[in-house]
Amino acid sequence: MTNKLLAVTQKDLKLLYRDKGGFFFTFIFPIIMAVFFGSMMSGSGGIKGISLQVVDADQSVISKAFVDKLDAAAELKVVLSDEATARETVRKGKAAAYLILPKGFGEAKGNLFSGKTATVQLGVDPKRSAIKGLLQGVLMSYAAEDMQSAFTDTSKMSTQIDKSLAEVRQARDSGELGDNDKTDRLLDFLDNLQEMVATDSFNNTSNSNENSAGNTADENTSEENEFNGFQPLIIETQAITVNRDGPPSGYDVSFPQGILWGILGCLSAFSLSLVSERNQGTLSRLLVSSANRSTILAGKALACFLTIIFIAVSLLLLGKLVFGIQIRQPDLMVVSLVAIGFCFSGLMILFSVISKSEKAASGITWAAMMLMAMAGGGMIPLAFMPAWMTPVSQFSPVKWSILALEGPMWRQFSLIEMLPVVGVLFGIGLVSFLLGVRLFKWQSSST
Amino acid sequence: MPDILILDQISKQFDQRKVINQLSFSVKEGEIFGLLGPNGAGKTTLVNIMTGLLNAEHGRVTLFEKHAPGDNFARANIGLASQSLALYEDLTAEENLRFFGKMHALEKNALKTAVSQTLAVVGLEDRANQRVKEFSGGMKRRLNLAVAILHKPKLLILDEPTVGVDPQSRNAIMESIQTLSDQGHSIIYTTHYMEEVEKLCDRVAIIDKGQLVALDSVNGLLQTHGKSHRIRYSQDNKVITVDSDNPLQKIRELLNSEQQARISNLSVQSPTLEQVFLNLTGRELRD
């Protein structure tokens, strides 16, 4: 019996592979769907448009200018916010990171010779190291740009030097600086610098040091040292754990949908195969052979099951390797795939048995599939559906299948949470298969 | 020879319409049994009942002395070449044979041998790896027959196996059937081609409207039901055909008449199976 069952399975798989239309709708169409909708839902991708919540606690002219600079940056999508909202937004996964410009940011950044360095706080999920690295680089490069600009703007520079001279003299006079010799040398240096700036010879010198200033900025992000005054920015990173109540990317939504479309294509192809066999006479030939009816149906169901598993595994691999979708619980994913395969193989048997002609099979299968897909989130993600659709979707195996796929991907379902989902899928599959076999035998005996 | 198939008072109806009505006959082991009837006479329904694809409402079918249609022994020992080409077009000839061989529980070496032998019987050895959809109608018919004989069934049921094929393929199929008969297979053969029946069949059953109209050897049917001889002659450049139960009397009358001098090309044709068939089932159209 096993050999006969496997022979039916092998034959059906061969026929599906050689049927160009069936092959396209089962294997190629779902990939197109997943990539197309994934790219639509994910924006244009890359680092462009990293969502950044910015909190300007300083509210100085300099901090506002820095925020404006970030806002104009192509790499970032800046949203101004308060601290609590910014943290909450990142925690919920609705923004990639937050940036806090604390009080004193403007003063530190505006006074080049004060010995202070502007400090910012960057809040990001430690698991998202790529985003963290990108943001640090972007922030540092804009801060370095500001610093370079300050050095090359002689009027700004002159004001800075005057301010610093006044501060040092005031400190010396009040006795705050102990070593008068060093203080005198610092004052001499500032006087000479002021003279250079006044004669406009400074620009030539600073231009030649452009690269070394940039290097300093890159290499010193948080360490305190005696040259801190010439660091463009100190970035203090704050780890913030993101609660995953949303998918990490559009592909994490579109790939489960794509898998379901592949499964529906497979369901259609296999449903039609039994009707075709009936019409072309091969079913009669099989029924006259030594194979019994259950073996024939089980062989077809197994072929359908294996195809579903193949589609799902292929798309998940493609999604993971190329589009970075996440499968956080691979063991639960295996259970999900088996349940989904079982569910739709059973449904395939039922659909194929209730249809008398190929046209009827095609119509019934596609109508049922469209309804299941529409109600179950195969077309529009469940999250975007109106509330009244939620109870309707409970009746769609597509909804349970998408949940079964998303659970181990980004919903982080526990085993307990997964049990009802796979239970429903196994239930639908079992009832459909038994009903299909019963109907098939009844049809045979009643004719 | 023992009976390999016995139909006893079989009846079957679809939607209140009786398709088979208390039909009885038997087929002997080793014979080629012809089953003739106009369209809608119930031949295919009868074939489906013999193979267990349909259940008879009344009566009893016995196969191989003690088995019922559809039981494991019966299914293992019946080969069916249905009227439709029951083949997978996207598989090659060999893949089709291998698949159906597996469904008949043939395995490994036995399967391999059976496939190559069967391909040789129907003359398709050199097309073994070609997909069926690329075959001509005649090649498909031959493969359809090959699938039916692959597992060497004791009883082979051929439902119009030469429909729509050219004379060469038909000849090849008929030679194959004769070879199978010589090897000891019992064959039930339904067709609309009378010359095939005359050439192949040991006995012939003619059924009409679900009932048995006649059952005998071809010669027996001709003697019993072939009353009219066909007399054909030319007169005044016209061909004239006359059917007569007493051809000698008719010829004497013609030769003694005044027309004698104008008659030429006189011939007499013995009764044919086609005439017998039309005598028994009538001349009105059935479709």
Image: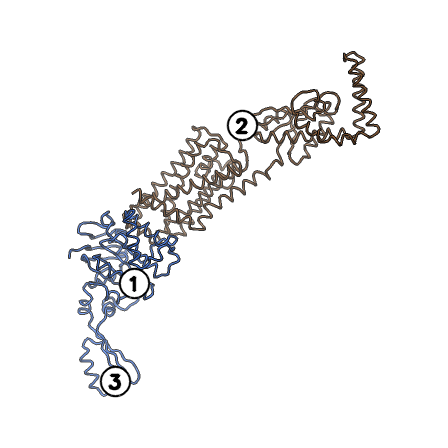
Chain colours: A brown, B blue
Q: Looking at this view, is B238 or A158 the one in front? A: A158
Q: Regarding mark 2 in the picture, which secondary structure is present there? A: loop
The residue tagged 3 is B263
x%, y% of residue B266? Answer: 24, 81
Q: Is residue B250 depicted above or below B21 in this figure?
A: below
Q: Chain of mark 2?
A: A
- Confirm whether residue A445 shows in the render: no
The residues bearing labels 1 and 3 have C-alpha atoms spaced at a distance of: 42 Å
Which of the labelled discs sits on residue A243, or is there none? 2
Are the numbered discs 3 and 2 placed on the same chain, yes or no? no
Q: Regarding mark 3 in the picture, which secondary structure is present there? A: strand
- Residue visible at 62% across and 36% down? A48
Q: Looking at this view, is A96 or A152 the one in front? A: A152
Examine the image and state in which quarter residue B253 appears: bottom left
The residues bearing labels 2 and 1 have C-alpha atoms spaced at a distance of: 76 Å
Q: Chain of mark 1?
A: B
Q: Is residue A176 depicted above or below A310 in this figure?
A: above
The residue tagged 1 is B172
Q: Chain of mark 3?
A: B
Q: Looking at this view, is B119 or A362 the one in front? A: B119
